[in-house]
Image: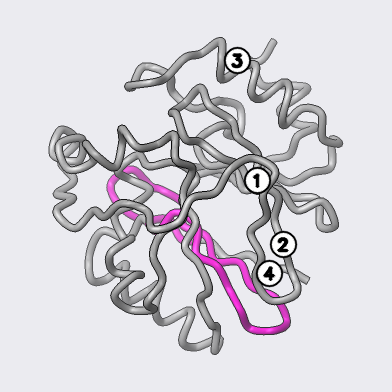
Amino acid sequence: MINIKYFTFNLFATNTFILWDETGECIIIDPGCSNHIEEEELFSFIRSNSLIPKAQIITHYHVDHILGIKYVKDKFGIGATAHPDGKVFWENSRSQGFDYGLYATDIIAPEYYIRENEKVVFGNSELSVLYVPGHADGSICLVNAPQRFIIAGDVLFYGSVGRTDLPTGNFNLLKRSILEKLFILDDDYTVYPGHGQTTSIGIERMHNPYIH
């Protein structure tokens, strides 16, 4: 069974996730830790639960989701995994960070690439990858069907969707991604977004004003 813990880090209140199962193997999703206090919070949880990090997965390469990549790499020896279509962002993440007051001097490119329909595997568990552009090229969601949940990045939020006024953003494409990739799932799927509170496919299908 997959356990889920998330932390809210940096000026943009980005949700960083740790997923682990009964083997103790875990993955870190969107390491947004931006200072030593946040880094220690992440590390302390992993250490106190005797977890073994196997991968760090990036839902998209916007700077607020990747500030802790180098820390995780240095601490646990695992490079980042991301969709290759996000290349424009890791090539420009430092300047993007400066624009928003995030001094992202230690951003590093992914070492591994993952694409739609591939699997993220750790311990006895796996997540399926969906490619969901519209908020940003290279955006992915991670789905676990047995436990019926989605790690959604900045694609779908409680009562909202990812902004589309940044480079490669496209509202019509984002809406199509949500309708064709996420809203085909059952209402009881829990959605863990990149910012804000947890929601569900059913709640967003019924009430999200950006989809109707």
Which mark, residue 210?
A: 3
User: In the rendered structure, which disc, 2 or 4, sits on the residue that comes first in sequence?
Assistant: 4
| Mark 3–mark 2 CB contact (< 8 Å) | no
Disc 2 crowd, CA 10 A, few/some/many (<14, 14-19, 20+): some
User: In the rendered structure, which disc, 3 or 1, sits on the residue that comes first in sequence?
Assistant: 1
Badge 3 element: loop
Give the Cα separation between the discs numbered 4 and 1: 18 Å
Residue 24, above or below 32: below
Residue 42: where, in percent of width, then height?
40, 72
Please tell me which residue is depicted at 77% across the width and 27% down the height of the picture. 183
Residue 92, above or below 112: above
Disc 1 crowd, CA 10 A, few/some/many (<14, 14-19, 20+): many
User: In the rendered structure, which disc, 3 or 4, sits on the residue that comes first in sequence?
Assistant: 4
Residue under numbered circle 1: 129
Residue under numbered circle 4: 3
Badge 4 element: strand
Q: In this view, does 196 lie to the left or right of 129?
A: left
User: In the rendered structure, which disc, 3 or 2, sits on the residue that comes first in sequence?
Assistant: 2
Badge 2 element: strand
Query: How many discs mark residues in the rendered view?
Result: 4
